[in-house]
Amino acid sequence: MQQHRIDFFGHSAFRITSAKGLVIWIDPWIENRLAPAEIKPDARTGGKTGRADLVLITHAHGDHLGNVISIARSPATEVVAVHEIQQYLLAGGLPNVIGMNIGGTYPTKGVKVTMTPAVHSSSIQNGNDILYGGTAAGFVVHLEDGTAIYHAGDTDLFGDMALIGELHRPQIAMLPIGDHYTMGPRAAAHAARLIGAGTLIPMHYGTFPVLTGTVAEFESEVKALGLNTRVVAIAPGEGMELQSRS
C-alpha cells in the first residue's frame, strides 16, 4: 500500500508528498529558528528544499510567505495564493502564480485545492511601507486518492469551521495553538471539535517567546472535550506517514 507523507519544518511550514509523488509546500518559512539547519537557505544553494510542485501561501505575513521566492523560481512550480499576493509575487518575478479567493477550488496536477476562510490580518512589509495582502485564508488539499488535509493558516476559532468539516471531511487538520497572534490551545481544541478530523497536527507554537501555547495544553483541552481524535506533534525536521486510499 502506498503512503502519503507530511513533513513539518517548524512554525506553519509543511511539505506534503502524495503517494504519487506530488510535492506540496504550505507556508514555507524555512528560516524559522526551529527548522533543521540542513534545509535553511545559504549563499550557495538558496535553500535545500528539493522539488516543489505546488506552494500554497495562506497569507502575506513574512513568517508565511517565507522563502517562497527561492523555492518557486522554476516555472514548473505553481504557487497558489489570494489574488493580492499573486500580484505581488508576479511583480517580484515569480513565473507561475495562481490567484484565487475564499471559497474557490483550484484543480491542478491531480489534486484539488480549496481556499477556506481564516480570521486574521494579512499585509506585506515593504521597507517602511505596509502593503495590503488581501484576505487571510486556510486551505483544504484533496490529494489524488481523495485524502483531505486542512491547513487552517493563522486564525482564531470561528463557527464556520463546522462547515469546513461538513463539506470537506478532512482526515487531518493542522491547527495553530500558540496564542497571542492566533487561537491558543483551548480555542484550538474547540476548533478540532467543529472540524471533526481524526488526526490533529499542532502548529504555530514555540517559534517566538510570545507564542506560549503548548502541545501538552492542547492535548489536555482535546481530552477534556472527549474528542475521538489523536494529536500528533511532529518535531521540526520529522514527518508522519498515512496510507493512501488507492
Image (tube, rainbow, N blue to C red):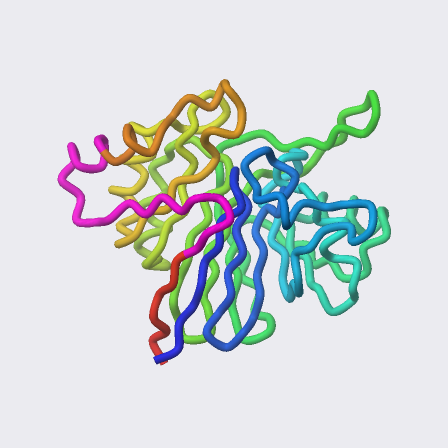
In-front residue for pair 132/206:
206
Please give left or right for residue 54 compared with residue 85 in the image.
Answer: left
Name the quarter where the C terminus is drawn.
Answer: bottom left
The residue shown at (36%, 42%) is: 160
In-front residue for pair 154/48:
48
Residue 151 appears at what percent x and percent y?
Answer: 46, 48
Name the quarter where the N terminus is drawn.
Answer: bottom left
Could you tell me how many numbered marks the image carries? 0
The residue shown at (28%, 31%) is: 216
**Residue interval drawn in magenta:** 220-239
Residue 179 appears at what percent x and percent y?
Answer: 42, 24
Q: Quadrant of residue 88?
A: top right
In-front residue for pair 246/216:
216
Residue 225 appears at what percent x and percent y?
Answer: 16, 35
Is 48 covered by the magenta stretch?
no
Residue 20 appears at what percent x and percent y?
Answer: 50, 77
The residue shown at (62%, 43%) is: 37
Please give left or right for residue 3 compared with residue 126 in the image.
Answer: left
Magenta span main SS: loop
Please give left or right for residue 6 compared with residue 31 in the image.
Answer: left
Is 233 covered by the magenta stretch?
yes
In-front residue for pair 59/213:
213
The residue shown at (57%, 44%) is: 36
